[in-house]
Image (tube, rainbow, N blue to C red):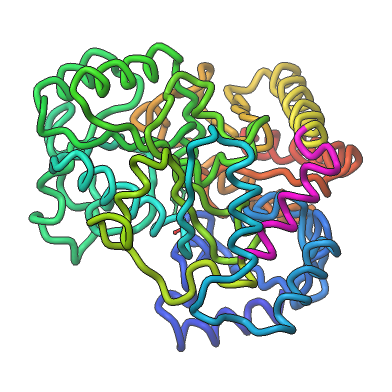
Amino acid sequence: MDKSRELFAQAQKLMPGGVNSPVRAFRSVGGTAVYPKKGLGAHFVDEDGREFLDYCMSWGPLILGHAHPGVIERVREAAGSGLSFGMPCRGEIELSQRVLDDLPDDYRVRFVSSGTEAVMTAIRLARGVTQRPVVAKFTGCYHGHADFLLVQAGSGLATFGTASSAGVPESMVQDMLVLRLDDMEAAEAALRKVGERLAAVVIEAIPANNGLLVQKPEFLAMLRKVTQDLGAMIVSDEVLTGYRVGEPHISLRNGLFPDLITLGKVVGGGMPVGAVVGPAKTMNSLAPDGPVYQAGTLSGNPIGMAAGAATLDIFRGTNGQEILESRGQQLQAGFDEIVGRLSLPARMQRAGSIFWIALECTELPRCAEAIAASSMEKYRTIHRKMLDEGIYFAPSGYEVGFLSTAHTAEDVARTLCALDGALRAAWA
Ligand code: PMP
């Protein structure tokens, strides 16, 4: 604990909040950020030599666990030949082929360096192709930190947005419509009212950045129907869900049938990679073939491409989806048993290898507004107790947890044992 504390104190003098991404500062759970020193499979050891079982997995990318030898070997090999050239490289072709293998034949891919850039690019493309300005998004969905996506609902239901961060002028969000998840009638009416000014609806394929808010299929089907009627596009943000929920792209099956898909996290295997995929007729509007500009100094760099390709190869070659589903089911069944036995108002929501613990509720919430703010107090206790047991859950009750293929049945059993105690403590 001493070294982590020391490092965190030092970091606060060097970086705002001591971090390079806000949730890492542990503000919503309290205490000191943990400083990892070495990752191995489902575990990491921190600077103080404490071992943790990790359910953060770098917020999703590490689908094979930390430092998978097969991934590290391919990254080492690539790094030995040069980190970046700013030229096309073989690695881009290799990762493109793997990504496009799971998609319809006419699809193309553009690699970028983060999920934020992927969504930013997809939306610019949708606006460029449709030549329309308005984009609709949903409260509780996160799509990265591009200015116009840092927007929240204005007053009243389904309104044009107001900026949710200082430094974002209202002019940046004036063409952003903010809707509520799970509210069929309000969303449909608001979209139809925008009519032919609507370029796109952007939605997480399964909203997973403010709890895990699995939508009813009818809601997604309504979005598809309305956008089709209006000649607008759907951008399905699969940065978080991609490859993680039983198949590579859930939005091709859950009723969204998007026009563009954004990827990140797993596709880069732990390196900074994002991607936009879609049919050639749309993708070819990107520069240099088309008028929609997009570029990147480090886009498609050999290291990111190697990490992504190695991760996808190993995941596929080792029945990754089945392992994840089996661990996910074990975690879910064990959790359900505990809350049933203890009669606690808590539920686990799960989509493949992604899980979220909903507290102070008997029914799973389907929109951000339905999450009880009081549940975050309970989460603080759970988080602290789990950490004491050497189990690292996300340092915020709104964040989901991630399994990897390195998590064993024994790891999950140990987690359930600790959760039993942590849940009891939260309601003690
Ligand atoms: N979209 C979704 C659905 C995400 O979950 C995230 C990150 N959590 C992003 C976009 C942004 O990705 P990045 O942090 O790589 O910019």
Measured along the vertical axis of the image, is residue 19 above or below residue 280? below
Q: Position of residue 42 (x, y in %)?
A: 80, 54
Q: Position of residue 105 (x, y in %)?
A: 54, 35
Q: Position of residue 186 (x, y in %)?
A: 20, 18
Measured along the vertical axis of the image, is residue 313 above or below residue 350? below
Q: Does residue 60 appear in the picture of this structure?
A: no
Residue lying at 59% horizontally and 34% vertically, measured from the top left: 357
Q: Does residue 236 appear in the picture of this structure?
A: yes
Locate the C terminus by quadrant.
top right
Residue lying at 64% horizontally and 72% vertically, measured from the top left: 303
293 part of magenta stretch: no
Prevailing SS of the magenta stretch: helix
Q: Nearer the viewer, residue 236 or 204?
A: 236
Residue lying at 75% horizontally and 71% vertically, measured from the top left: 46
Q: Which residues make up the magenta segment?
A: 305-321
How many numbered marks have been drawn onto this rendered protein structure? Answer: 0
306 part of magenta stretch: yes
Residue lying at 78% horizontally and 68% vertically, measured from the top left: 74
